[in-house]
Image: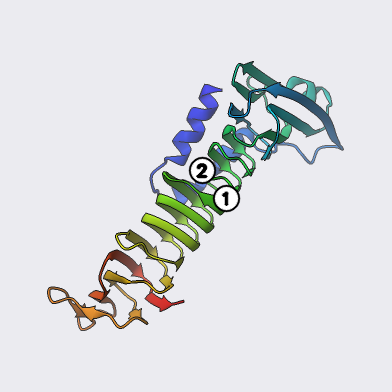
Amino acid sequence: MRPILAFVIAGLAMPAAPASAQDTHLKEIVRMRSYQGRDRGPEQTDRFTAKYRVGRDGRVSIANISGDIVVTGGGGEEVSVDAVKRGRGDRSQLDQVRIEADNAPGRVDIKTVYPMRSSSSVSVDFTVVVPAGASVEVHSISGSVKVTGVRGSVRAETVSGMVTAADTPKLEVAKTISGSVTLTNVQTEGDISVGTINGTMSAKGVKAHGIDFSSISGDLVIADIVCERLGAKSISGNVEYAGSLTRTGRYNLTSHSGSIRLTLANPSGFELNADSFSGAVRSDFAVTVAPTGRDDHRRPGPGRTMHAVFGDGGAMLTIRTFSGDIVIAKR
């Protein structure tokens, strides 16, 4: 399992690269363990079911290579696993792909094992029910990941596929390289890290101390967020934020090629530092240009820079885009 997880984590932490390099990298990922040969002959399936006792607050990890993973919080003290192996062609390939579990007191580690140097066409889809209070760590290479109703800590990562987390109050990480990320009703006292390289991100009803959103190619749509610190960055995409500001909050929103729009609900005040190289800056709030700042729309080029204050100036907004408009709107 170690080489698989190391590959996933290294890929998700990958720095920004030129589009051609990203495309080559993603093609290599898919070539390694994607759905090779799935159109060769009728589909064959084989089902695996098992239960493991971990306790109400145990730890569960699932590592998959090709296929979707769905994890749901339930009752009791057992982990229930229902997995379906799918492939086309020779049925013997299904037998070569194994599902292994290491079950010790308070934890279970589940993984898919393929034969070495195999070009197997087999994928494995997992449906797992865990005790609601369990901690869950899920990794996949080619497949989507969905975690719902888990009250323990949650880390959900994949290389090629969507990541969805809902009603997970202790979410820590939700990342993919090629796919969208969707968060709904997530609350935690800590920090959340959310990222994708090629995909959109959507978050609604999220409460945390700090939140970091990062996308290379895709829009960020953030609504009903409560946090002390927000970092939202998209290289090629728009950034939309709708919600409240905490009085001492720090909000940093950046896009290289896209517009940024904040829709705010009755903020007590904020200090605004906004800069767009080739777009406009507009605020629906009656801001006052700071004495040491500027509202510079006369500089060379079409862009604009604004340093201004509204109300008590408590929250700090730092908003920058190279190619796009900046709008601060009332909700």
Residue at the spot of label 2:
171
The kind of secondary structure element at disc 1 is: loop
Q: Position of residue 105 (x, y in %)?
A: 60, 16
Which amino acid does the dot numbered 2 rest on? Leu
Apparent side of residue 196 relative to residue 257 in the rendered image (left or right):
right
Which amino acid does the dot numbered 1 rest on? Gly
Q: Position of residue 30 (x, y in %)?
A: 60, 40
- What number of labels is visible? 2
Q: Is 207 situated above or below 327?
A: above
Q: Quadrant of residue 310?
A: bottom left
Q: Position of residue 33 (x, y in %)?
A: 63, 33
Quarter of the picture holding the N terminus: top right
Q: Quadrant of residue 77?
A: top right
Q: Is 141 situated above or below 103?
A: below
Residue placed at 60% from the left, 33% from the top?
A: 32
Residue at the spot of label 1:
179
Residue placed at 79% from the left, 26% from the top?
A: 48
Residue placed at 59% from the left, 32% from the top?
A: 134
The kind of secondary structure element at disc 2 is: strand
